[in-house]
Amino acid sequence: MKRSNRLRVPALAVMAAAALAVAACSSNSSPTPVTGSSSTSSATGSANAPLTASAPGITATSILIGSHQPLTGPAAPGYSEIAPASAAYFAYVNAHGGVYGRDINYKYLDDGYNPTTTATVVRQLVLQNNVYGIFDGLGTPTHLAVESFLNAQKVPDVFVASGCNCWDQPTADPETFGWQLDYIREGKILGQYIAQHFKGKKIGYFYQDDEFGMDGVKGLDYEIPKSMVVSRQSYVDTNVNVAPQVAALRASGAQVVVSFSIPAFTALLKLTSLKLGFSPTLVVSNVGSDPITLSGLLESFAKQGGATVNGNSLTNGMITDSYAPSLGSASNSWIALFKKVHDQYDAKAPFDGNVLYGMGVAYTFVQAMLKAGRNPTRADLVNAINAGLPQGPLVAPYAYSMTDHDGVTGAYIGVINNGALTPEGPVLVTDASATGAITPYTPAQPAAPASGIPAP
Amino acid sequence: MTTRSTPRVLGAALAAAALIVILSIKLNSFRDYQIAEIAIEVTAVAGLTILTGLSGQISLGNGAFMAVGAYTTALLLLHLNWPWVAVLVLAAVITAAAGAVVGVAAARLHGPYLAGATLLLGVALPSVAYAYTGFFGGDQGLDVNFTTPAFLGLNFPLTRWEAWVCSAAALVTLVLLANLGRSRVGRSWRAVRDDEVAAALAGVNVAAARVLAFVVSAACAGLAGGLLAIVTGLVAPGAFTITLSIALLTAAVIGGLGTLPGAVWGSLVIVLVPTYATDVATSHGLSSSVASNIPLAAYGAVLIVVMLIFPQGIQGAVRWALGLFGISAGPGWRSADVSSVQPHEKEGTQ
């Protein structure tokens, strides 16, 4: 009977202590954010207008933006380089006068690629830190966990780092904008290339069993005749044994395998194929084909299996697509600019596709902020993007308009040679519909501004 | 005894509720959200601490039970549009049924075998969402719509309402568990935990007691999963990885296994330490590769320190501190200390 007392909860004491702990942590609590009002017309305020605290997160001297990123956990390798690269570009901008004299402060928090954590850290950024907007939130399942929250709070949700078609819902989610090439467009562009260049060959699909892979397959199917596809194999990213899928592709006699996979699974596909004596032509989506990341993965996976391989020689001949200039083309003004910023502010990271991504998306954000005006409200930023942004570091124009929140609209096909991408053929642009034509985009990409900072 | 204690527990719960309401109004929206998060964690950890601390069974699968509750909630709200209270109750009931199934198997297993079996559950069950993408929404998950009720007015902050709902659920859970632990059921659990043969000889149905503990624990996890669904607004498999199950067990151990106040302490640590550590790490200009790992390191450090200094968890430390000041909460404290040590010893020998 004595023991029965053990569960008599001094609930009050515990709860009080809990409450105090919460209270103690809220020393930096701030007033409820004022949501941006759409009625002000400060977007084109006079050039000499004094800088004011025109919106939450904006002071006379600074702009605070936030993001959720997989800095730890399974998605961290590679992707964790993106936010520091963006921060490096912002540091460069800040050192050269900032945005109308304001410094950009970029606070990115780790969500470990877990949607529950994303929900927490984004609420912290919006409700506690009072950020102006969320920038480049990474991942489809993670960002979906906060999309409706951000739109309900009328917080700009710009340039989500995911190619999901779901960011393009201007009516339901007017605050949200994509940036990178969406997977349907990418599938169409790759699909057309395959249909034209591998006529009469047997095609196999290998794709991640989620929205990323399925959107890609949707795009492929728009362009590749059904009769050419001999096998469709999917994988889940939690199971690293892809031998059954590769064996099925081999048995189907596929001569070309299209892979909508993340880098780790592109590497597994390649190594497993080698082991089974299967050597089809590989066509890999942009997400899974960064040559530097891939080569490192191939070598480390092979090492775990007790073999030694040369990563670069294994990626040779892989066909992929890219919406950014090739890292190898040192003469490209954008690559030169970002290499310069990288060497000065982010030299510890390898200069790879992830770094290029982070810098490119940061550049686009500065473009949008400059367009939003000297003293922008939150609505001003959204309106500025809705009015369209000029083409920047990417090879094709953006889709941004009142009715389209997709990002870049096209890419070029390239072949990997000695760890670098060699462009092959023109930039192709298209839309995300089943019937939209794929057309070459001929205007040359505008050069990067000499100052490295977009013109207002 | 029970008749005298129940009003005390109820009174304490009501006082705590009042305190939470005041705090939720005083603090900012993000703190309200954290109150909700803590309350969800408390609900799940309380169920686990009963299972492990009282009935002596370990579970590495309670994250999967949370997934069951969360998906039940999402599907019911999405397709049937039931009132949320009914949905949460049903989420708990359905998860309890899942717990009964697991419990029947678990009642036959001990120690590492039970840990292995429940680990399997924790790893495998969330993957079902990938297998039936059409129904469960796959990787993207299911959206959950939860709004403030009309009677609170248009400008009532959603996070405050969420804090209230979750805290109410957590308090109800704590009161019910406190009474259950004091009842005949709780006594039979302790008897089974300490010596199965003796318990059986004394007329306790050992298998039934063990299964029931799983059912109760699963119901708590299911309720917590339902709350998590309405608070985060999304149910996706990425939220229910094995890390979640381990975090729940960590919270129970760090707070003080088998004690309900310990569930509250453990939840506070689990929810607040990572946020606080991130703030500290990012505000001191550390390089991002270092800063991003500091919350994990801090979490590990707190775990090691607590276990080294207070093997009975934070609640053990609280009792020790109260003892220093000569404060005793009643005759039950000493014996409670003794019994709460036993699960640790027990596990070591199994």
Image: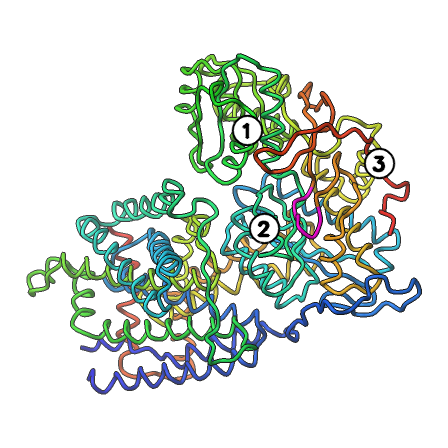
Residue at mark 2 shares a chain with residue at mark 3 = no
Residue B249 in view = no
The residue type indicated by label 3 comes to: Pro
**Local SS, label 3:** loop
Q: Which of B189 and A239 is in front in this view?
A: A239
**Magenta residues (range):** A400-407
Residue at mark 3 shares a chain with residue at mark 1 = yes
Label placed on residue A446: 3
**Residue B171 on image: x %, y %:** 36, 75
Magenta run includes residue B80: no
Q: Do the residues labelled 1 and 2 touch (CB within 8 Å)?
A: no
Q: Mark 1 points at which residue?
A: A220
The residue type indicated by label 2 comes to: Asn
**Residue A409 on image: x %, y %:** 69, 38
Q: Name the residue under label 2.
A: B293
Quick one: label 3 or label 1, which is nearer the N terminus?
1
Dot 2 falls on which chain?
B
Give the foreground label among 3 and 1. Answer: 1
A321 up-or-down from A59: above or below: above
Instruction: Give the Cα distance between marks 2 and 3.
Output: 40 Å
Residue A244 in view = yes
